[in-house]
Amino acid sequence: MSDIIDFIKDYRVIVLVVLLIGSLASISLYGVPQGLDLKGGSLVQIHLEHPVDTTTMGTVTTVLDKRLNAFGVSDIKVRASGDQDVIVEIANVQPDQVAKLIGTPGKFEAKINNQTVITGSDIVSVKTYSVTGNNWEVPFTLSVDGAKKFAVAAQGKTGQPVDFYLDNQLISSPEIGADVANGVPTTDVQITGSNSTKDAAVNEAKGIQAVLQSGSLPVSVSIAGIQGISADLGDQFRTGALMAGLLALIVVALIVFVRYKRPILVLPIVFTSVAELVIILGVMSISHSVELDLAAIAGIIAAIGTGVDDQIIITDEVLKRGKVSKRRRTGLNLKIKGAFFIIYASAATLIAAMIPLFYVGITRGLTGIGLLSNFAITTILGVLIGIFVTRPVYAKFMEKFVVKDE
């Protein structure tokens, strides 16, 4: 009984329990961010016309993010990938619904007699679009200087068209009314148009409003690739991952039992594996900076597998001592320290191997080999949790309960 109390009071056990409770609370409250692999969605790779500096890349990602938000798309992530690519992740939206929106530069011009009179930079605000039948209207407000330029260009040209272009595509050509052609500046302008159906008219108006609100991109872009993952496929991935994890635990338990023929060793090893999984997911839940995708799941499995290896090293070091008396505990502790030396060296080697993959993912973004960066992150996280939290607790368990049984 005293050994149980001493074990529970050990600071390493207390730290493990606190982390487990905190992780479970965080997972319950905030959930674990899931990647497109699991929740479904689209991943769009946008290629810039030429490499840009950090400031320009920041403008590109900001405009795209603002454009998608203005279009009404939620749960989006826009991130730079190197100096010439941008990755856009969109959940629960078909890629063809937004590809045109984010693949367009957003260059706006209004021309009278083929002469540009105002551009997107003259727009200070865009109001909500309206649709009546198949006709749509997007009102916006010009700056004072823009309104003056427009008034001068439109003066005396009643009945002539003013052509509105978006990325050099004519979208509307309303006639200049007498109230506009009087030379008096007005800041309130609207673009009007129509489409074959009301739904198409709504989408067109929404897209134009979003582009005008977000402004133009500082560099031409093109869609380099689109990858869509259905929500049903994500459910299959999630179910498959859960089954794989459960089977892995069962196999680990069987192997440990067959190797040592002692049930008392099976439970702590399986518990340690589950504890590492919960804490890793808890850290991901709190940070919300690493998503649980297939690469992350593979990293978690690798980390847990490494943890089982470490526990087998500790177990072998303890059991090969045969019967251990209290007087020989000093020698036993030295053996455990020797096991931890091997564990630390192995962890350092593994982390060093993961750092290049982690670096590529951070600097290059989620393209190419960078897609595996979550594998490196969860592997490193799992290894660190193992060597600093769960392995010491397992060693304490061996010292308190297994050695005494000899």
Image (cartoon, rainbow, N blue to C red):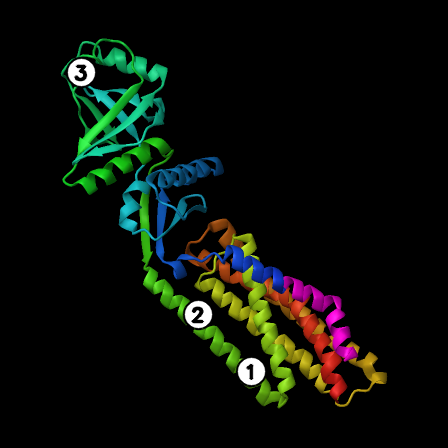
Residue identified by numbered label 2: 241
Q: CA distance from mark 2 to mark 1?
A: 18 Å
The location of residue 395, given as percent across then percent down, is 71, 75
Residue 383 vs 212, above or below: the answer is below
Residue 39: name its quadrant.
bottom left
Chain-order first, disc 1 or disc 3: 3
Name the residue carrying label 1.
253
Q: Residues within 10 Å of mark 1 (few under 14, many from 20)?
A: some
Q: Is residue 17 magenta?
A: yes
- Nearer-N-terminus badge (2/3): 3
In the rendered structure, which amino acid carries the disc numbered 1? Answer: Ala
- The residue at the point 37 percent across, 65 percent down is 235
Could you tell me how far apart the alpha carbons at marks 1 and 3 are, in whole angstroms? 82 Å
Q: Label 2 to label 3, Cα distance in Å?
A: 64 Å
> Bounds of the magenta span?
1-19
Residue type at the position of mark 2? Ala
- Circle 1/circle 3 CB separation < 8 Å: no
